[in-house]
Amino acid sequence: MVEYLTARHRQFVRQDLPFLSQMIEGIADAGKYQSILLDLSTLFPLFVDDFVHHLKEEEEGIFLKISYLSLLEKGSCHSIVRCRCGRSVG
């Protein structure tokens, strides 16, 4: 599951976000929705930055912990604990 979600995250960042950005940039005349397009053009890059940061936190935090728990459950990893400083203990 973790591998799938990580791969999906990377696909979203590499393919989907650039595609959405190009779509927003490609709207030449939004007519009566021009003010919405201006807001979207301003907010979308902020969303991208925040979303990429969120994905990184998930991958380096939650997903890593799930992977460790999975290894412990399988008996592949006995008592490895990673400290906040990055050192492994166990």
Image (spheres, rainbow, N blue to C red):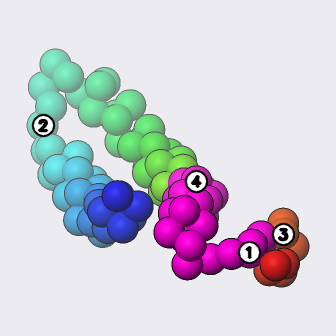
Q: Tell me which segment is drawn in magenta.
A: 57-82
* Residue at x-position 84% and y-position 69%: 83
Q: Does the rendering let one see residue 37?
A: yes
Which residue was labeled with disc 3? Answer: 83
User: Residue flagged by tag 2: what amino acid is it?
Assistant: Asp
Question: Which of these two is toward me, 26 or 75?
Answer: 75
Query: Horizontal and vertical percent for residue 29?
Result: 12, 37
Tell whether 69 sits left or right of 15: right
User: Residue flagged by tag 3: what amino acid is it?
Assistant: Cys
- Give the alpha-carbon distance from disc 3 to disc 1, as whole Å: 10 Å
Mark whose residue sits in front, 1 or 2? 1
* Residue at x-position 82% and y-position 79%: 90
Which residue was labeled with disc 4? Answer: 62
User: Residue flagged by tag 1: what amino acid is it?
Assistant: Ile
Q: Reply yes or no: does residue 55 show up in magenta.
A: no
Q: Residues within 10 Å of mark 4 (few under 14, many from 20)?
A: few
Q: Secondary structure at mark 1?
A: loop
Q: Secondary structure at mark 4?
A: helix
Which residue was labeled with disc 2? Answer: 29
* Residue at x-position 49% and y-position 55%: 55
Query: Horizontal and vertical percent for residue 11?
Result: 27, 65
Residue at the extreme front of the image, as rendered: 75
Tell whether 80 sits left or right of 62: right
- Give the alpha-carbon distance from disc 4 to disc 3, as whole Å: 15 Å
- Give the alpha-carbon distance from disc 4 to disc 1, as whole Å: 16 Å
Mark whose residue sits in front, 3 or 1? 1
Mark 2 or 4, nearer chain start: 2
Q: Disc number at residue 50? A: none
Which residue was labeled with disc 1? Answer: 80
Magenta portion: prevailing SS class: helix
User: Residue flagged by tag 4: what amino acid is it?
Assistant: Ile
